[in-house]
Image (cartoon, rainbow, N blue to C red):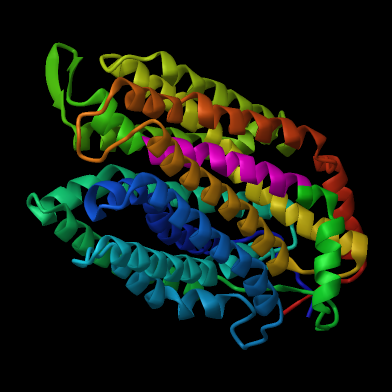
């Protein structure tokens, strides 16, 4: 049966977005809170934490293409990708709970436990998110509708980010009653239940429609060969590495920046004095950034009327990085400037995030058009591989740089250590963001070219199931 539906329903777009809301409860926690949990709550040394994240995430990233190839070769009555989203909804919650436990072990025992539980958590994240990312490529063949679905996806993702960023520390304090270890266990148990509910929603509300004319299984070596020859994917994948390194370094440094450099501050708003302790300041700062990212994402379609996806990704990422650079010049009392700069950093990054995934699905269409084979899940898995390599580098750099500048957890920091924390919020991540923006200037697929590719693929008589 040929596919006649031109537009996706709002309900299906919302259903698709629920999956990324769930994922971002975890992703925001990975980026912002996990490093300081390991150093300040669990008691790992910063360099050991950085190295653990490096090796654990390298192992995890290697699983992404494998998961993609498995999903591409799956055939069930529910489709290729949706069964994995539902099947691993509960296991990822269990893994998250275990990762934020703090058993009473020796230093080496704690490190072993951190390796084991973090690897398990990231593998569960892969099992859910590779099929989830690939799902966008098969709910419709229309690039404009995929961009729209991506917009819904990231709007809901940012709600998940906002909730995790603005509420988590407060919940930890509330449930822990002064015991952070206890608070983290309870919070992650609640997040696991909530995330599972959202993932089951994605499974129930979406449908897989796109399939090639013949359900022919590609050879793995052919899939990998096509991926390597797919120049647009190589460029967006490399840019993603630098983009994620940029944003992860900033995100992971935020808690250290406010706990050790900024400290408690007083904010005067319309004559009203507000005491900003570490938890409230950090949460409100992250919340403002997430709201700005949300509005940037919502305006992406408007920006796309005047600028190509390539220009939006490149220019906005560079502007975001430059705004981040200015954090180096702030003193602890520059409260309002911190909020303003973070709003600008996040607003421009919002459109980058939406555009990135729309560009990835375009590279899947390009690969089918160029090589005559479609490997949607492998494309998205390889894209997640690039994302996780950036996540890996960003997290490892934070640990190593903190150690290099003499950071000691739960102590008053030296001027050298404070300088390192400031650099982690400004110059170091900005370098990676600017490089990522420059790379995408060489991306070869224009929006006009993408319309031509879609028309050609349609003429090859794609059928829908």
Tell me: residue 7, above or below residue 237. Answer: below
378 above or below 174? below
Magenta range: 235-253
The quadrant of the rendering that contains the N terminus is bottom right
Name which residue lies at 63% across and 62% down: 136
From the top left corner, tell me how far across and down residue 21 is, in percent. 43, 57
Residue 141: x percent and y percent? 75, 62
- What secondary structure characterizes most of the magenta part? helix
Residue 252 is one of the magenta-drawn residues:
yes
Q: Residue at x 80, y 41 (%)?
A: 447
Looking at the image, residue 453 sits to the left or right of residue 58; the answer is right
The residue under the point 35% across, 70% down is 93
How many marks can you see? 0
Q: Quadrant of residue 337?
A: top left
Q: Which quadrant does the C terminus fall into?
A: bottom right
Q: Can I make out residue 71 in this image?
A: yes
Quick check: 133 left or right of 174?
A: right
Depth order, front residue of 331/19: 331
Asked if the stretch drawn in magenta spans residue 110, the answer is no
Residue 462 visible in the shown view: no
């Amino acid at each position: 049966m040929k596919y006649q539906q031109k537009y996706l329903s709002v309900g299906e777009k919302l259903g698709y977005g629920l999956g990324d809301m769930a994922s971002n409860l975890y992703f925001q926690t990975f980026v912002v809170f996990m490093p300081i949990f390991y150093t300040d709550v669990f008691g790992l040394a910063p360099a050991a934490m950085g190295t653990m994240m490096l090796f654990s995430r390298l192992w995890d990233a290697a699983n992404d293409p494998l998961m993609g190839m498995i999903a591409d070769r799956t055939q069930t009555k529910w489709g290729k990708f949706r069964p994995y989203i539902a099947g691993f909804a509960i296991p990822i919650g269990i893994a998250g709970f275990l990762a934020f436990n703090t058993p009473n072990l020796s230093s080496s025992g704690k490190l072993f436990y951190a390796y084991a539980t973090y690897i398990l958590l990231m593998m569960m994240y892969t099992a859910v998110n590779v099929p989830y990312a690939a799902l966008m490529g098969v709910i419709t063949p229309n690039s404009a509708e995929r961009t729209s679905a991506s917009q819904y996806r990231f709007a809901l993702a940012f709600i998940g980010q906002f909730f995790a960023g603005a509420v988590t520390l407060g919940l930890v304090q509330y449930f822990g009653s002064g015991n952070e270890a206890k608070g983290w266990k309870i919070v992650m148990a609640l997040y696991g239940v909530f995330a599972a509910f959202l993932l089951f929603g994605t499974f129930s509300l979406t449908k897989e429609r796109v399939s090639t004319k013949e359900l022919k299984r590609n050879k793995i070596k052919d899939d990998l060969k096509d991926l390597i020859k797919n120049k647009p994917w190589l460029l967006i994948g490399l840019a993603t590495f630098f983009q994620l390194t940029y944003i992860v370094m900033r995100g992971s440094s935020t808690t250290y920046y406010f706990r050790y450099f900024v400290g408690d501050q007083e904010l005067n708003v319309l004559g009203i004095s507000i005491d900003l302790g570490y938890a409230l300041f950090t949460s409100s700062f992250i919340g403002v950034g997430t709201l700005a990212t949300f509005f940037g994402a919502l305006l992406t379609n408007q920006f796309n009327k005047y600028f190509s996806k390539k220009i939006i990704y490149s220019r906005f990422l560079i502007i975001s990085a430059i705004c981040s650079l200015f954090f180096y010049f702030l003193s602890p009392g520059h409260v309002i400037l911190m909020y303003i700069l973070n709003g600008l950093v996040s607003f421009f990054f919002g459109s980058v995030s939406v555009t990135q995934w729309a560009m990835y699905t375009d590279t899947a269409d390009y690969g089918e058009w160029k090589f005559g084979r479609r490997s949607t899940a492998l494309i998205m898995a390889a894209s997640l591989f690039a994302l996780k390599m950036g996540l890996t580098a960003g997290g490892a750099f934070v640990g190593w740089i903190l150690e290099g500048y003499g950071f000691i957890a739960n102590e008053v920091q030296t001027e050298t250590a404070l300088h390192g924390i400031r650099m982690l919020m400004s110059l170091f991540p900005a370098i990676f963001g600017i490089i990522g923006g420059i790379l995408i200037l060489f991306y070869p697929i224009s929006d006009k070219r993408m319309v031509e590719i879609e028309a050609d693929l349609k003429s090859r008589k794609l059928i829908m199931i």
